[in-house]
Image (cartoon, rainbow, N blue to C red):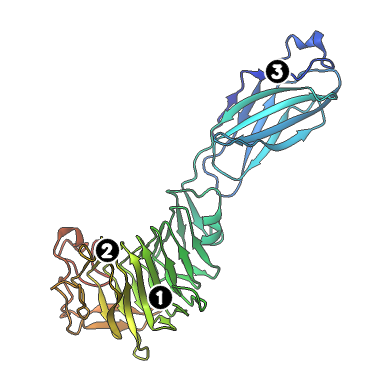
Amino acid sequence: MQKFPIIILYIFGMMSCNSFNTENEKGALFSLTINHDITRITDSAFVYLNWDEISVLGFKRWVIERKKVEGSHWFKAGEINNRLTTKFRDVIFDDENLLYRVAIEDTSGNMKWAEGIIEIPNTKYLMVPGEQRTPQIAFDSPLIDDGDSIFVSPGEYHDGLQMMSKHVVIESQKGFEKTFLFHRVEMNEGILKGFSISDGRGSDKDNGGGINAIGKAVIKNCFIWNNKTGQHGGGVFLKDKASLYNSVLYSNQSSISNHNLYISNASGSVINNTFVLANTIKGNNVTAFNLKPGFIFLNNIILYGTTFTIDTMGIDNGSVIIDYSRMDSVLISGDNLIMDDPKLIMLDKTPPEFILAGDSPCINAGHPDDQYNNIDGLRNTMGATGGPEGK
């Protein structure tokens, strides 16, 4: 594999020179070489340090330290008590560029340092479970930073998932039909794409049984079903600029009857989704509270229950858009709603599959702007399968 050497060209001075061999010290400058064969770190990796042998009176030890180039704190990587040992292998767990320094120390505490920088290749993605066991473990890895991705193979994942304070894309490789999260999700950043999310349980005080999405979180192409919570949004609780696209929310339950989706103090987007309640569930399907200017609700299908409820009006709803959807009208909705039977067919699969009959009034009836067109270029079809990110 390719090596990446860095050679140190300078040293720092001693604290004093009393116990160093001054006769030999005239040529005592020593150089340090740093190498690695890293192409991409997935867990841990090695960095190799080599330096020149030099002689001093009263040798005590070699000291090896490192820090992130942008950091302020030096971390002791190791120490060596054998004067003849002039190499060290360091283990690293992050993809930050590093500054190393090596010191020779005598018995009086005098030290001479050599120092230099090594560049570490960035890790831009991790694979689950091939490289990290679960999405949460991958997300928590120091290798995953803003802008990175986590790709998840088909399977069942049972530990919790918190996507907090890092803008990371977590995406299933084969879609929600084959990739299952059996737990509640909390997120305030990033994108969650292509998962079946069920069996989430919020406490009596938790909003969002399946997903609690606030801040700038984005949910795409997910199937969110059979989740419960004691507060708002048995399926999803959406707040701030958080947005929901091309997802199905089915048969989620809230103890206070705001079942599939609860939208609170929101200015994000809810576009091309399907919201269905089981026949046995009574109450609100989608509920909105205090919508903010800029909020968009378009091209959605809502079926059963009280389709859309405005809990409390915001101070200024002038720039709120609620239109081109299959739902009952509300005070601030547009003139392009469909209230007829959407002719939505549920196929017996795990999770269930919802498709529109060929004569559904929702086909090619979404917003006519080109930005909402289906992937075949035709006018938007309402529901989770329509639009540019539909199927």
Q: Viewed as shown, does residue 355 lie left or right of 147?
A: left
**Residue 281, placed above or below residue 293:** below
Up the image or down, 198 lies above or below 92; here it is below
Q: Is residue 325 visible?
A: yes
x, y percent for residue 30 = 69, 18
Toward the viewer: 166 or 15? 15
Query: Gap between marks 2 and 3, in whole Å?
Result: 62 Å
Say which amino acid is labelled 3: Gly
Tell me which corner region of the image, top left, top right, bottom left or bottom right, holds residue 281: bottom left
Residue at figure coordinates x 82%, y 29% from the top left: 82
- The residue sitting at the bottom extreme is 280
Near mark 2 (Cα within 10 A), the count class, few <14, some 14-19 or many ≥20, is many
| Type of the residue with mark 1 | Gly
Q: Secondary structure at mark 3?
A: loop
- Going from the N terminus, do you reach mark 3 or mark 1 first? 3
- Element assignment for label 2: loop
Label 2 belongs to which residue? Answer: 295
The residue beneath circle 3 is: 13
Mark 3 in CB contact with mark 1 (< 8 angstroms): no
Answer few, some or many: residues within 10 Å of disc 1's Cα (few below 14, many 20 plus, some between 14 and 19): many
Q: CA distance from mark 2 to mark 1?
A: 20 Å
- Tell me the mark number nearer the camera, choosing from 2 and 3: 2
For label 1, the residue is: 235
How crowded pointer 3 is (Cα within 10 Å; few <14, some 14-19, many 20+) is rated as: few
